[in-house]
Amino acid sequence: MKMGFLISFVNVKGGVGKTTIAFNLSHALRLLRRRVLLIDLDLQENLTDKAIKDRDKVENTVLDLITRDEVTASECIYDTVVDGVGIIPSELEIVRVNKEIDPVSNPQSLFVLKDKLEAVKTQYDYVLLDLHPNVDILTTMALIASSHYIIPIKPDSYSLKGLKIVNEYAGNISRANRNLKEIGILITDLDKRTSLANTFQEALNDTFGHRVMNTVIKRNAAITAAAFNNSTVFQYDQRQPGCQYFFSLAKEVILKCEEVVIDTDYHGVGVNG
Ligand SMILES: Nc1ncnc2c1ncn2[C@@H]1O[C@H](COP(=O)(O)OP(=O)(O)OP(=O)(O)O)[C@@H](O)[C@H]1O
Ligand SMILES: [Mg+2]
């Protein structure tokens, strides 16, 4: 049976575009006929706020999934504003996981999310996990459940510091999850008009070489405007360059995970099709 890929977006630096990428990539993958599930693991609930179709219907969140034995993943999945993309929502109280789970006395407790998601891995081609910008029990659980991770990075020196921490941390997680693979470092919100941006991109390519993804998510005001309107950039305005960036990202992710080359370009795909 075909099993889905679970991809975490991780960086200890906040505001690098994790939520934006998860949401827009879900739509781009959908345009390429993949079945997608989003999981919000951030107490800020940003992804839930933007993506969920009907918040009033939510009965179970990812907190219920992790902390209540009897709750299954399918009981936590809700519709999003993108047809065919589901979401497991978050809630503020999710931080309780960090207090309630004690991996020292019970190391197996870190595998709860992984075990619960096993059941949905056959129903989805991609499960995208949006994390908060901390290295803690929640992030560890997400990476133990994941098959892949992407490190989004914004052109500033703080992001580079964050990258160093993520490198060490991912190395440690790999011992608990030997299947975990890095898709790559993804440059986001790159403003080509600034000289810093060009220097940053060159420095990153020099230092990390093939680890830097080919796709670059450049700055595009429509991406923020879309999020403000609780929609993806594809829904907001399908002619915006942001659509190209996320479409290209989806193709690169499919190439890395499925080893399938997609030669359709963005204009060849109907946004509503
Ligand atoms: N390519 C882009 N062009 C324009 N704005 C962008 C782009 N990428 C991200 N942004 C904006 O940058 C801000 C931060 O992005 P986002 O919330 O996705 O980051 P995050 O990593 O999820 O943050 P946090 O760590 O708080 O969860 C948002 O206002 C988003 O709209
Ligand atoms: Mg976020």
Image (spheres, helix red, strand yellow):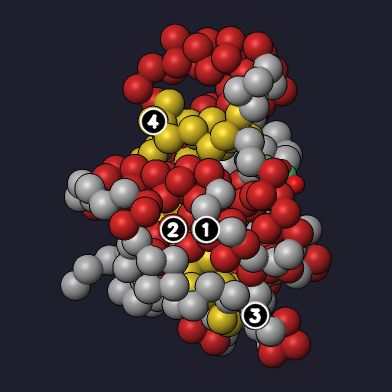
What residue is pinned by disc 4?
214
Residue occupying image coordinates x 27% and y 45%: 255
Lower sequence index among marks 4 and 2: 2
Separation of residues labelled 4 and 2 (CA atoms): 16 Å
Disc number placed over residue 156 in the picture, else none: none
Select label 4 or label 1 by which is in front: 1
Residue 169 can be seen in this image: no
Separation of residues labelled 4 and 3 (CA atoms): 32 Å
What residue is pinned by disc 1?
238
Q: What residue type is labelled 2?
A: Ala
Q: What residue type is labelled 4?
A: Asn
Residue 37 image offset from top left, x and y in percent: 47, 69
Front-lying residue, 11 or 108: 11
Residue occupying image coordinates x 66% and y 49%: 222
Q: What residue type is labelled 1?
A: Gln
Element on which disc 3 rests: loop
What residue is pinned by disc 2?
28
Q: Residues within 10 Å of mark 3 (few under 14, many from 20)?
A: some
Disc number placed over residue 53 in the picture, else none: 3
Q: Residues within 10 Å of mark 2 (few under 14, many from 20)?
A: many
Element on which disc 1 rests: loop
Element on which disc 4 rests: strand
Front-lying residue, 82 or 165: 82
**Residue 179 in the image: above or below residue 68:** above
Separation of residues labelled 3 and 1 (CA atoms): 20 Å
